[in-house]
Amino acid sequence: QNSIQALLTAIQQLQRSSEESQLEEQRLLEENLKLALQLEQSNKMMASLERENERLSQETKNTDELCQALQERLESSTNDNQAYNRGIKQLDEVVKQLMQKVQNSESRVQETNLLHCYRKHTSCLTE
């Protein structure tokens, strides 16, 4: 009878141990499922981030190309502006020279007029 009792106790312990193992297995399966779902979500997020990174890389490339084009236009515009300024300086110089010639001509005209008047008056006086 003791051996039957011991056998029954051992069977009960095995049943409890088996139930505990089943519960642990169930808990581990649920945890595995949660981790698998988290991994799937992480993979989706990673794919989304990779697409966003590719989009941003392309946008950066486009922006760099635009900046390069704008830099070239700025340099060209600066060169054009410098050439324009040189042209204006040359025109200013030509205008100054022309003004000087006009003033010289006006002075000569006045001198000629004065000389003409002088001769005219002198001839009037001598007659």
Image (cartoon, helix red, strand yellow):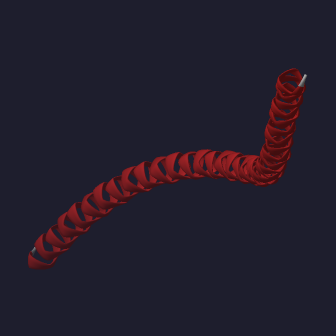
Q: Is residue 44 left or right of residue 83?
A: left
The image shows residue 24 at horizontal and vertical percentages of 30, 60
- Name the residue at 67% across, 46% down: 51
Image x and y of residue 69, in percent: 80, 49
Q: Quadrant of residue 27?
A: bottom left
Image label count? 0
Q: Residue furthest bottom?
A: 3
Above or below residue 101? Residue 25 is: below
Q: Position of residue 42 (x, y in %)?
A: 51, 51
Quadrant (top left/top right/bottom left/bottom right) for the C terminus: top right
Give whichever of 75, 60 is nearer the camera: 75
Between 5 and 102, which is closer to the camera in this rendering? 102
Vertical comparison of 95 with 124: above or below:
below
At a point 27% along the width and 57% down the height, the residue shown is: 19
Front residue of 81/44: it is 81
Residue that extends furthest to the front in the rendered view of this protein: 127
Q: In the image, 1: left or right of 47?
A: left
Relative image position of residue 108 (x, y in whole percent): 86, 39
Quadrant including the N terminus: bottom left
> Which residue does the image show at 84% across and 50% down from the upper left?
90
Quadrant of the rendered structure where residue 101 is?
A: top right
